[in-house]
C-alpha cells in the first residue's frame, strides 16, 4: 500500500513539472533575397543566435520582420521573437542560395481564436467582404474581415484602405474624407475561386460621430474590382474586450 502511495505521489510530482516543448519553425535564409515574416502583433524583441543574420522591422510596419543572411554558408543558428501580448516564436535558420519560401504569415494565430459575433457585409459582383468581429485590447482595436470570392477569377487585394466620411451629403457638397491609418501593414493572400481569406486591421482606440461612417475599401492592382464596406458608429460600439 505504501509503495502504491509513493508511486502516486511521484506521478503527481512529475505532472506538476510537466513542460511544453515549442518546436522551432525552419527558415532558409539567403544573402540575395529577403525573407519576410508577418506576426499577429507588434514585435517587442528579436534575438539572433549569431551575427550571420541581419534582422530588422519593416518600415511603418511594427509586425513585419525582414531577415537576410550577412554571409554565405553560415553555420545553422536560431532566431527568437516576442510580440505584444507575450506570444513567443522560435526559428532555426540555415543558409540557402534560393529559399523555398520568402513570405510567412502567422496572422492566423489570433484570427481564428476569436469568436465571430458580427456580420456586416457588402457585395460587389461575385466578391463579398464581411466584418466578423471587433476586439479591444490595451487601447488597440482589431477589426477582422472575411473576403469571399464566388467567381472563377482569383482576386488579389492590392490596396486596403480605411477612411471616415459623412453618412449623407448633398450633391453640391464635396466629399470630405479623413484617412485612418492602421497600426500595422495589412496582409491578405490571394482569394481563389470559391474560397475565403481573412485579414485584420488594427487601430488605436477610436470612435466616430453618429453622422459619420467608417469605410473599408479593398481593390485589386488596377482598381478594376473594388469592395466597399461602410461601418456605422453603433457597430463600432459593439467592440468586445479581448480576454
Image (spheres, helix red, strand yellow):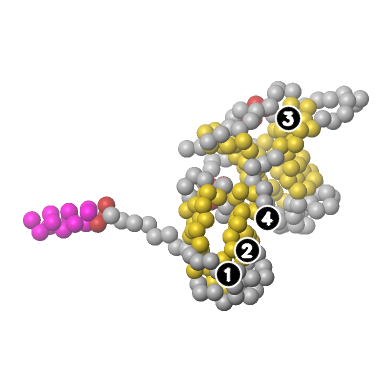
Reading the chain from its start, which is encountered first: label 2 or label 4?
Answer: 2
| Marks 3 & 4, CB-CB < 8 Å contact | no
Q: Secondary structure at mark 4?
A: loop
Tell me the quarter of the picture where residue 54 sits: bottom right
> Residue at the spot x=69%, y=29% of the render?
232
The picture quadrant where one finds residue 189 is bottom right
Q: Which mark is residue 213?
A: 3
Mark 2 lies on a secondary structure that is strand
Real-space Cα separation, disc 1 to disc 4, in angstroms: 21 Å
Image quarter (top left, top right, bottom left or bottom right) of the N terminus = bottom left
Mark 3 Cα shell of 10 Å, populated few (<14), some (14-19), many (≥20): many
Query: Furthest residue to the left?
Result: 1
Q: Mark 2 and 4 residues: CB-CB less than 8 Å, in contact?
A: no
Q: Depth check: give the residue in front, 66 or 136.
A: 66
Q: Position of residue 40 (x, y in %)?
A: 57, 49
Mark 2 or 3, closer to the camera? 2
- Residue at mark 2 to residue at mark 3: CA–CA distance: 38 Å
**In contact (CB < 8 Å): disc 2 and disc 3:** no
Instruction: Tell me which numbered mark, 3 or 1, is placed earlier along the sequence.
Output: 1
Count of numbered labels shown in the rendering? 4
- Taking the image as shown, residue 238 lies to the left or right of residue 172, namely left
- Seen at 73% across and 30% down, the residue is 213
Question: Residue 204: image x %, image y %?
Answer: 62, 36
Q: Say which residue label 2 marks.
A: 35
Q: Judge whether residue 26 can be spotted in this image.
A: no
- Circle 4 is placed at which residue position? 189
Q: Nearer the viewer, residue 68 or 3?
A: 68
Residue on which disc 1 sits = 28
CA distance for labels 2 and 4: 17 Å
Residue drawn 84% across the image and 25% down it: 169
Verify whether residue 135 appears in magenta: no
The magenta region covers 1-13
Amino acid at each position: 500500500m505504501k509503495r502504491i502511495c509513493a508511486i502516486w505521489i511521484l506521478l503527481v510530482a512529475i505532472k506538476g513539472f510537466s513542460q511544453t516543448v515549442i518546436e522551432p519553425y525552419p527558415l532558409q535564409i539567403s544573402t540575395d533575397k529577403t525573407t519576410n515574416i508577418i506576426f499577429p502583433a507588434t514585435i517587442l524583441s528579436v534575438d539572433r543566435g549569431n551575427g550571420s543574420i541581419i534582422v530588422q522591422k519593416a518600415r511603418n510596419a511594427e509586425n513585419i520582420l525582414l531577415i537576410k543572411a550577412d554571409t554565405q554558408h553560415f553555420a545553422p543558428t536560431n532566431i527568437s521573437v516576442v510580440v505584444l501580448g507575450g506570444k513567443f516564436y522560435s526559428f532555426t535558420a540555415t543558409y540557402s542560395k534560393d529559399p523555398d519560401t520568402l513570405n510567412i504569415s502567422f496572422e492566423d494565430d489570433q484570427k481564428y481564436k476569436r469568436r465571430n459575433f458580427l456580420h456586416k457585409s457588402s457585395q460587389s459582383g461575385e466578391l463579398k467582404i464581411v466584418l466578423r468581429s471587433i476586439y479591444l485590447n490595451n487601447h488597440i482595436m482589431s477589426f477582422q474581415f472575411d473576403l469571399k470570392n464566388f467567381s472563377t477569377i482569383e482576386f488579389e487585394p492590392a490596396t486596403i484602405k480605411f477612411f471616415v466620411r459623412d453618412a449623407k451629403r448633398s450633391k453640391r457638397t464635396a466629399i470630405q474624407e479623413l484617412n485612418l491609418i492602421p497600426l500595422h501593414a495589412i496582409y491578405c493572400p490571394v482569394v481563389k475561386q470559391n474560397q475565403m481569406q481573412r485579414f485584420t486591421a488594427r487601430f488605436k482606440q477610436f470612435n466616430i460621430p453618429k453622422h459619420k461612417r467608417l469605410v473599408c475599401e479593398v481593390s485589386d492592382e488596377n482598381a478594376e474590382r473594388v469592395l466597399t464596406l461602410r461601418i456605422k458608429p453603433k457597430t463600432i460600439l459593439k467592440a468586445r474586450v479581448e480576454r
